[in-house]
Image (cartoon, rainbow, N blue to C red):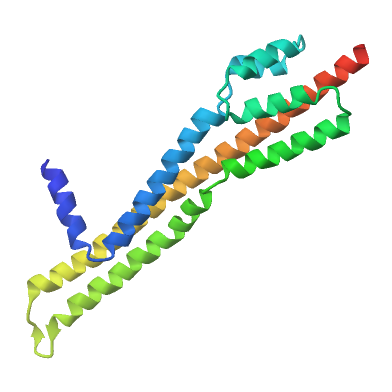
Amino acid sequence: MQSLREAWWALQLGGVIMLPLSLLAILALAVIADKFWLYRREAALPAALRDLVESWSFDWDELARASAALLPGHHFRQLFELVLSLRERPLWWIESRVADQAQLMEKQLARRLWVLETVVTAAPLMGLLGTILGMMHAFRLIGSKGLVNPTGVTGGVAEALIATAVGLFIALLCLFAFNYLSRLQASTMDEVERLSTRLIDHIRLDREGA
């Protein structure tokens, strides 16, 4: 409890710039939580379903049943159902529609990532602005006759340092989250491309066998 009080007191010393910094932090945390929930709910593929698509002994009916078990908005369910619905069409048409679906999926996965990228740049600049304001406040307390309010000067310096530290902390948090989510997006899209290729290969095998 004492540490929480000290943290709250330190934030209060940060000055007016702490308000926009706090809003940036809340916005960034909301985006991070939303992206993790999105990947867990709509982009995580069960290992059994992945193994089914990767297997040689492939059954389209089994794929349809496994896809139906996923949530309606799941990206891989939409991909698999698209291929299932176009299975009798020419291969060039299937490949074109699958590419369109993958592009749409990539846009949805990248949605709001720009917010984190913006916060990475904006938070340190806001912290720097808080540093300037805090130092200006400290210098105003130094009159022509010298230092007239040592406590006020110390508070101004503390305001400057706290604003800088909070801005850098927010930027680092968003930077790590942005890099991780970007790698997760790239990994997911690689899996989409690989499984799409496997499904088209299964269609080719079925037609050659027929």
Q: Is residue 195 above or below residue 34?
A: above
Q: Quadrant of residue 130?
A: bottom left
- In what quadrant of the picture does the N terminus appear? top left
Residue at the image point whose x is 69% and y is 42% from the top: 103
Residue at the image point whose x is 43% and y is 56% from the top: 119
Q: Is residue 177 above or below residue 148?
A: above
Residues 24 and 174: in front is: 24
Q: Quadrant of residue 97?
A: top right
Residue at the image point whose x is 65% and y is 13% from the top: 65
- Image position, residue 55 (x, y; %): 73, 13
- Image position, residue 155 (x, y; %): 15, 67
- In what quadrant of the picture does the C terminus appear? top right
- Image position, residue 143 (x, y; %): 12, 86
Left or right: residue 8 compared with residue 71: left
- Image position, residue 69 (x, y; %): 58, 17
Residues 175 and 192: in front is: 192
Residue 198 in view here: no
